[in-house]
Structure formats: structure tokens, C-alpha cells
Image (cartoon, helix red, strand yellow):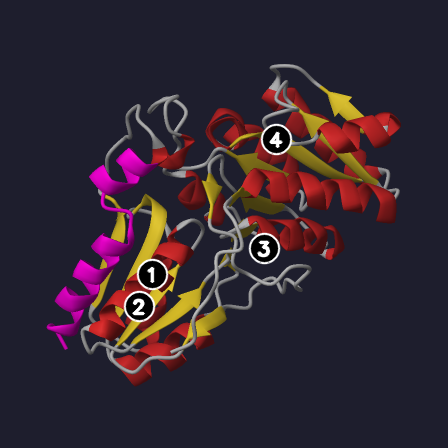
Amino acid sequence: MKTYTNTGNKDTRSGFGAGLEELGKKNENVVALCADLTGSLKMDAFKANHPERFFQVGIAEANMIGMAAGMTIGGKIPYTGTFANFSTGRVYDQIRQSVAYSGKNVKICASHAGITLGEDGATHQILEDIGLMKMLPGMTVINTCDYNQTKAATLAIADHNGPVYLRFGRPKVANFTPENGTFEIGKALELTEGTDVTIIATGHLVWEALEAAKTLNESGISAEVINIHTIKPLDAQAIITSVKKTGCVVTAEEHNYLGGLGESVARVLAENAPTPQEMVATQDTFGESGTPAQLMEKYGLNAEAIVKAAKKVAARK
């Protein structure tokens, strides 16, 4: 079984900041807009080195989206930055009308997604944003797993013509993907091969899936782990190929099971290869205040929960 090494815990939002700064040097059309959260989004370096291309809009997220849409008309590539809750729910109308409907080349970059935002509590812990964004026609939806992948995705979406929702997080998590690796939108990554169960994970749950696979392997269950960093467009063929081999699947995400990765996978399987599936996700609930580790344990979003789900689904084959 292939193993992965955590080279040191790092926050994915810093991967975004590093990628944005690198883009600032490479592409003069890249501009950045922030809704009064420059430090939280790690946009400080871009602001310091490219002040003429940085726009602090204040606590005016709807205006930020409108400004970004307008900038694309002049050939700019705007990256907007704020918390995931404010990047989606607060400005959904503006995104729908001014960005998605018009096919504008806006990159909506959202930090502090999911319950790992932690102590700020339920009002800030959006768990429905993937569903909101994937339903918009033409919107690409990306949810990265670690610092390196977030940096790579930040760079890659500048070359993609069209609206993108890039989702990442606040806490320091395992950093295990290759440094300076390439990022291909819509291409799933098989991390480990297996024959008994497929584990399809996204975001912070990818590392937990790898840890779960090690535990399962020790108990005689061969787990195949797939990193779905792009939820839309979804790599349907990678999913179908894997589950036809293993005969069952667990999806794992830091999001409500309604509207998230699990539902997207279920649709693919229902249409192509009906397969037993278990979903590791929040169960139609809001979060609460607590440390990321406490919340991930309480809401069943960790390796232990994935192991349990894998054993359950394997028994359904």
C-alpha cells in the first residue's frame, strides 16, 4: 500500500496566499479584491508587492462581486477573498446574476469553510456552500486538501476561462501532496490502490481518508483512496472505474451530506453503476463553537468515522 508523509501541518489559506503572490509576479492581469479580511485570507504579500492591483472593498461583499465582474470586461482576472460564508450565502444573488449567468471570469476564493473554522461558531461555519455553487451553470467548484494543492489550484485557475469557486480552510492540516505539483481541473487523483472499498474524499477529509485506509489495511480490508479536488466538473470515469472494481464506496467531506460531494457521486453511480454507498459528512445540521479537532470528532468527520463507514458499506456488498 502506498503511504504518504505529512511534511508539516500548514493551513490551506496560506497556500492560497502563496499562490496569489506568485501569480502577481507572473500575470499582470491578475487583480485581488478583499472584503476587510486581508490577513485572514493571507493576501498581505500580494497587497504589499502589487498595491496597484489590490482593492480593499471593506465589509461590502456584494459590491466586491459586482466590481470583480466588471473588471473581467477589461481583461482582468479578479480573485475575490473572504470567508466561505460571506463568499457564497451572503452574495448568492450577485454571483448568480453578475458572474455565473454572464460567464464572467471571476475566481471566488473562499477561506474558513466548514466546521474547522472552529470557535467562531455556526454563524460562520458554512456547510452548504458546495451545494450552492455547484448548482450554478458554468461554475467550476474546487475543494483542496492541503497547502501544496491549494497553492497549485490557485495558480491553475488563472488559466481557466470562466467562473471558479475555490474553497479552502483556516486550521493547520497535514501537508502531504507534492510541492510545486501540477493541478488539473476536473481530474481525480488516485492516492492508493485497493480492491475492497473505494474511499472518495475531498478537502480536509483526504488526509483522514488516507489514515483510515491504513487502519483498514491492517484489518484486512484493502481501501482505494481517491482525492476529488474538483467537485464540478466531476471526474465520473475515475469514480465508475474504481467502484466497479471494489463494489462499494464511502464519500467523505466537511460539508452537509445534502448537496455535497456525496450526492454528486451518488448521481454518477445511480446513472452508471448502482453501488452501495455510505456518506461521511454532517447530517443536515449547523455546527457550533469549539476547536476544529473537537468538532471533527463530534460530527464524525475523521479517520475513525471513515473506517466505521467502510466496514458498514463493505458488509452491504
Quadrant where the C terminus sits is bottom left
> Which picture quadrant has residue 283?
top left
Residue 107 percent location from the top left of the image: 66, 42
Q: Name the quadrant containing residue 94.
A: top right
- Residue, disc 1: 211
Q: Say which residue label 3 marks.
A: 149
Contact flag, marks 3 and 2 (Cβ < 8 Å): no
Question: Which amino acid type is marked by label 1?
Answer: Glu
List the residue tagged with mark 2. Answer: 214
Q: Earlier in the sequence, mark 4 or mark 3?
A: 4
Q: Residue 52, position in %: x, y?
A: 88, 26
**Of labels 4 and 2, the one closer to you:** 2
Amino acid marked by disc 4: Leu
Whether residue 135 sits left or right of residue 66 in the image: it is left
* In the foreground, 99 or 21: 21
- Residue at disc 1, secondary structure: helix
Q: For the point 42% across and 49% down, which residue is it?
A: 204
CB within 8 Å, label 2 to label 1: yes
Disc number for residue 282 = none
Kindly indicate the quadrant of the structure image that contains residue 277.
Answer: bottom left
